Image (tube, helix red, strand yellow):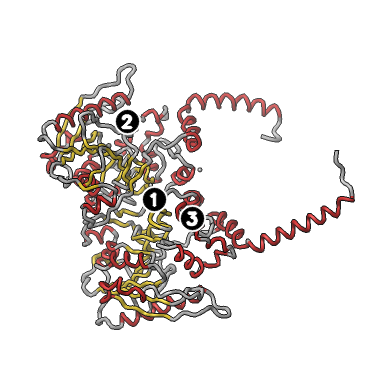
Amino acid sequence: MATFTWRRRPSIILFSVLFTTALVYLIAHNRYQIQNTLSYATRPIWDKDEAPNNIIPHYYSEGLKIDSHACELHGWKQRKDTANVKVLDSILMSSELDLLEIRLNELDSVVDYFLIVESNATFTGLPKDTFFANNRERFSKFAPKIVYRFLPGYPLEGKQTAWGVEAFTRDNMTALLRSQISKFPSGTRSLVLMSDLDEIIAEHTVRLLRACDFGPSIHLQLRDFMYSFEWYLGLSSWRASARIWQDKSFYSHIKGTEIMLADSGWHCSFCFRTIPEYIMKMKGYSHADRIGGRINLLDPRRIQDIICRGRDIFGMLPEAYSYIKFFSQLNLEPSKSAVGLPRPLIIVFSIFFTTALVYLIAHNRYQIQNTLSYATRPIWDKDEAPNNIIPHYDAEGLKIDSHACELHGWKQRKDTTSVKVLDAVLMSSELDLLEIRLNELDSVVDYFLIVESNATFTGLPKDTFFANNRDRFSKFAHKIVYRYLPGYPLKSGQSAWDVEAHTRNTVTDLLRSRISNFPSGTQTLVLMSDLDEIIAEHTVRLLKACDFGTSIHLQLRDYMYSFEWYLGFSSWRASAQIWRANSYYRHSKSTETILADSGWHCSFCFRTIPEYIMKMKGYSHADRIGGRINLLEPKRIQDIVCRGRDIFGMLPEAYSYVKFFSQLNLEPSKSAVGLPRYLLEHADKFKFLLPGGCKRES
């Protein structure tokens, strides 16, 4: 055995001195990183989000009129006279010429003047080019609207800070705004958009704010992206705002009100074309102290790697105010949580405990199996979804032509007149979703094929909801091909999955029958999705115009109970296929190719509580009830719908722990932007599907 001797003491002392010196050196030279790690890792415990807390749901879909109805949807009144409203967009110019071009084109139709303040130095006092002044010709078509001010820059002196220079620059914008507004006729109302250049407010948002009396000030929640529109952080950007200018108003990028309009545009942070622009911003903006002496952060090869991997450019932890958001942003994926008792008592307790444990396991086998299986799924399972995700390009008014096809890597079809589009669904009880679906797709679908039974997949009797309500869909009667499929109780050895397969085979027969009537040379594009999986009209127009191949899956925005509870882009089973002799109607994987963001999947989106109960007992996953009859209790279901919890009390079906934790405690969405147009045009009728409408009919 080794023994301690005093001879070793000098070595120990020397080691201690060297170790302490090294530790002090590391702490001194990595103070910012250590402080950041401790601060950001514990932020959800000690800090609170500064963002406005009164979030106004935002209702918008392509083609929706901005009128009194739209204003009332948001709880506002329509302005009596919009002709005397001037819209001013105010911008501090750094180097983002590409984002400026996008911003000016996005807002040109709704903005009267673009005010630009530009300096020849960064906030930290480093010299820089006057990018706008040097490239004015690029923006010549906006020249009549641009009001430009050059602000001479200088190196920081004495106690000056980057924050002080930034405040001075914003004060200059205030002065420029006052100067421009003073030229307007008396009685003019000035609506001023206040946001950094990379915070682009959507055109339809400005049209809404111009038409509706939202009050004196409102913040605008933006979709937050990093490096490009590939790395999505969430709806976490809130500093952009819109204000009706008053005598004492000033240009601001801090909180001015607790009111915020949801989903109002895009924030693309550090979205540069060139590596030098990244370096300039890192060294030049008010957070430049984040470099903290780590010159290696500015290495171009490192920056390129960071951009492609979606990691923080300063190596910092996520700035999150809950651990669910913290973990969801920690590893982004590219838009594709009896000692001391008397011994006799312990023995008796053990007997009772063991007995109770055996009883609980026997009566809760499904729940225990689910908990163990779903909690460990990211370790042992792999997502079955297609892995070749095609980026989807669409914006309001974008033409579906050869350019659009080429954007997606496809060629335009030579003749679209010979393409017939068929939409095939299995009808359960979702009359409301069927109405929304038919109106969404009416302009692009030639025939709607509907198969309906008088029994559920589990053999329980049910109404023929469509047949009993045909008058409601009379305007689509000439396009509807309907087949009734008699249902029956399950036979011995038969499962709900067998009945579902038989029902889908019936759809295959109906498709073949209808397609056989088409003229020779007709190409048939068949949409295959459950009724609650609604493919967007613009997606179908794209697929009809472009040669995507023979089969493609369609990634849908996944919702639960209504469009208030958003799960992510996890729905993939919907597909579109060019029908062949050996084709069949399916809801399983047919290809590894999938088109991103192609519509909406609204699961368990019912108007009434009895519909929830019928689906829970009647669909192929009815075994999830597992003998727990209490799951069917109406009061419980109502509570679950309003809280966004799983209706079967199950853990999230996720294949990574980042997604697992992000879905474990959902936050209600306030955004109704980009939802089916018909839904928003009839928002009063479908209030239960929109944010804030969780109460169900009994």
- Name the residue carrying label 3: 306
- Residue appearing at x 50%, y 24% in the figure: 362
| Rendering coords of residue 684 (x, y %) | 24, 51
Q: Position of residue 680 (x, y in %)?
A: 25, 52
**Residue appearing at x 39%, y 53% in the figure:** 230
Q: Are marks 1 and 2 in contact (CB under 8 Å)?
A: no
Residue 644 place in picture, x, y as percent: 40, 44
Q: Looking at the image, is mark 2 or mark 3 earlier in the sequence? A: 3
Mark toward the viewer: 2 or 3: 3
Q: Is residue 142 left or right of residue 12?
A: left
- Say what amino acid the circle numbered 3 marks: Ile
How far apart, in angstroms, are the residues tagged by discs 2 and 3?
A: 45 Å
Where residue 200 appears, as percent x and y from the top left, is: 35, 64
Q: Which residue is mark 1?
A: 668
Above or below residue 580? Residue 257 is below
**Helix or strand or loop: what does disc 2 sit on?**
loop
Q: Can the viewer see residue 192 in this picture? A: yes
